[in-house]
Image: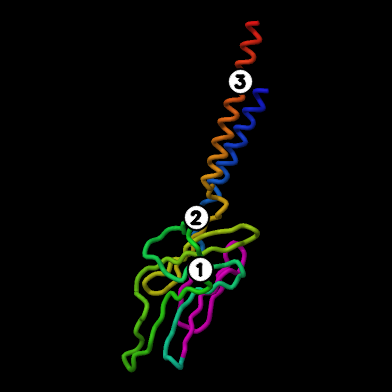
């Protein structure tokens, strides 16, 4: 009987450990942009999720670089953040395009950058192989997509999961103590 309770506690602790390992952040891409019109595919977790696109509009004499979601369950924040970090679980990420750099031709003086020339971080969310991920795309001050870091949403336990885990440990401990008390009472009688 006691072995059953010990086995239950070991199983619960190994499940918690595997969830913690699943939340590892992985840096996996570096795409320099050479100002050639076109796009580059961004495959994450084996699935084509986003394109990094450089385009020109001759009518308005503008150029832009965007990260566009191409998969049905891939989304990106439209605004860039000035600090790195994975998105908060409560953040709603539902955009399909983020303009990471835009330029306007200003006569013979060349191009003027319309977006701030600073490091920016764009939050993203996508699904691959039935699992949901959240991450951050890092674009440097030269408008180069340097990396994408992401983690499985399922890998980070919710507060309710922690509560269930603690309740399970408490119930196993209570059952062990009750079993011990019953044996002590039976031995005295």
Where residue 106 sits in the image (x, y, percent)?
Answer: 34, 90
Where residue 101 sits in the image (x, y, percent)?
Answer: 41, 77
The residue identified by callout 3 is 178
Residue 157 shown left or right of residue 189 in the figure:
left
Prevalent SS, magenta region: strand
Where residue 66 sits in the image (x, y, percent)?
Answer: 48, 76
- Name which residue lies at 54% across and 44% down: 160
Under circle 2, the secondary element is loop
Q: Earlier in the sequence, mark 3 or mark 1?
A: 1
Q: Nearer the viewer, residue 117 or 80?
A: 80
Return the mark for residue 67.
none
Q: Is residue 72 above or below residue 170?
A: below
Label 1 Cα neighbours within 10 Å, binned few <14 / some 14-19 / many ≥20: many
Q: Give the number of the mark in front: 3 or 2.
A: 3
Label 2 Cα neighbours within 10 Å, binned few <14 / some 14-19 / many ≥20: some
Per the rendered image, the range of residues in magenta is 29-57
Q: Nearer the viewer, residue 151 or 167?
A: 167
In the rendered structure, does residue 84 fall within the stretch colored magenta?
Answer: no
Under circle 3, the secondary element is helix
The residue identified by callout 1 is 76
């Amino acid at each position: 009987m006691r072995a059953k309770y010990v086995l239950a506690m070991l199983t619960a602790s190994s499940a918690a450990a595997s969830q913690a390992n699943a939340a590892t952040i992985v840096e996996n891409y570096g795409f320099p942009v050479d100002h050639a019109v076109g796009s580059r595919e961004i495959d994450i977790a084996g699935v084509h999720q986003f394109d990094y696109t450089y385009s020109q509009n001759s009518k308005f004499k503008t150029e832009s670089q965007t990260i566009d979601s191409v998969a049905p369950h891939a989304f990106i924040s439209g605004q860039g953040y000035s600090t790195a970090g994975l998105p908060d679980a409560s953040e709603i990420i539902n955009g399909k395009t983020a303009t990471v750099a835009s330029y306007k031709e200003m006569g013979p003086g060349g191009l003027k950058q319309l977006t701030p020339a600073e490091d920016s971080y764009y939050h993203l969310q996508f699904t691959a192989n039935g699992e949901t991920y959240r991450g951050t795309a890092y674009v440097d001050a030269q408008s180069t997509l340097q990396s994408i870091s992401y983690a499985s949403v399922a890998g980070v336990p919710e507060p309710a999961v922690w509560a269930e885990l603690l309740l399970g440990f408490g119930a196993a401990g209570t059952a062990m103590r009750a079993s011990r008390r019953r044996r002590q009472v039976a031995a005295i009688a």
